[in-house]
Image: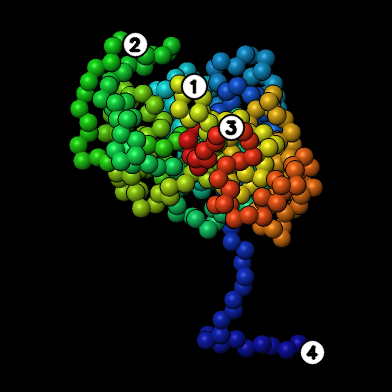
Amino acid sequence: MTQELGITKMQSFHFNIPEKKPKIAYFILVHRFPEQFKRLFKAIYHPENHYLIQIDQEIDINTEKSVKTFLADYSSVYLLKSKNVERRGYSMVQSQINGMKYLLNRCLKWDFFINLSDQDFPLKSQDFIFDFLSRNKEKNFIKIVNQIKKKPDTLNRFENHFQEIDIGFSGIPYKRSFMKNVTWYVGGQWMILTRACCEFICYSPEMKKFEDFYRKILFADKSFFQTALMNTSFKETIINDDKRVVVRVVDGDITLKPETLTRADVDFLIQGDNLFARKFDERVDESILGIFEEALRRPYQITNNANNIDFSLLPMLSINAKKSLLLDPETIINPPTQLTKQMLNGNK
């Protein structure tokens, strides 16, 4: 016997439909560590993401072939033609903009842009990052510091006008005036941006004056995106946090140089909610990459929650180092090393 069910217009049904995962477009520069890049790529690969790779021109042809052969086994991978990039010049900014435009022009479906280098490594799984981005759909993450209030000594970068060429900078720098009605910001080159923000950067008329101004200054990649976004209509979407861990130490004339991370820094790195860290160098310490690779293969995350820590992932840490994981993150001022270190969630 078949029973007919009458459903009135006033009745409604509610289904728990899983929220769609945000798709990520990664832009990765392969510069000095092609083999390390392969480990990074495997750690962040997910078939629903997109991966745009730029191989530095300085890499020899055999190494370049090795990278391309490796990438051939993966889908949703693209290569951006390498151009000369001057580390202190606007070409660093242009490289990022070129990456954004490439990803936008291919009509790919993605929601967030994340830039990395071959010396970066994830601290969280892709599922963790998907969940984080799902909860911050309209937010853009980049480190920002008011330049006049916090870094007035860097304003001379704007006063001097430089001509960038293939092998550096030419001629004698000359003075020029500042842009009017602009608040200046600095930070780092690492960011997590929404697709809408990337479209704004690449195509909005508001960006033109910033492109013209920054094209002739030193270290443009440390302030172009910060200043442009904080002085335009995207200001309210900016979160002062690039979700990266960078440890810096005093090193000669360089006030704060990025320190190479080792297994001694593991308990330091897992605290907080950062998604990535840098710099790693497998020639100095390969084991720290192995620790995080193993953790990312597990169905759980390394965390500073005392109930979830699996110390078997940290076999070489001392008892005191293990105990430090249980402390509130803010109580640990420095990582366990003899060097004086400062953690900055954002600079190179």
One can see residue 85 in this view = yes
- Relative horizontal placement of residue 266, taking residue 19 as reference (left or right): right
Residue in the image at 36% along x and 17% along y: 164
Q: Earlier in the sequence, mark 1 or mark 2?
A: 2
Between the C-alphas of marks 1 and 3, the distance is 13 Å
Q: Which mark is residue 170?
A: 2
Secondary structure of residue under mark 1 = loop
| Location of residue 86 (image quadrant) | top left
Q: Which residue is mark 3?
A: 339
Mark 4: few, some, or many residues within 10 Å (few <14, many ≥20)? few
Q: Which residue is mark 4?
A: 1
Tag 1 near tag 3, CB within 8 Å:
no
Badge 1 amino acid: Gly
Tag 4 near tag 2, CB within 8 Å:
no
Between the C-alphas of marks 2 and 3, the distance is 38 Å
Vertical placement of 12 versus 338: above or below? below
Between the C-alphas of marks 4 and 2, the distance is 90 Å
Q: Nearer the viewer, mark 4 or mark 2?
A: 2
Name the image quarter holding the N terminus: bottom right
Q: Earlier in the sequence, mark 4 or mark 2?
A: 4
Between the C-alphas of marks 4 and 3, the distance is 81 Å
Between the C-alphas of marks 1 and 2, the distance is 27 Å
Foreground pick, 30 / 239? 239
Name the colour scheme: rainbow
Q: Which mark is residue 252?
A: 1
Tag 4 near tag 1, CB within 8 Å:
no
Estimate the x, y position of residue 254 in percent, counting from the top left.
46, 24
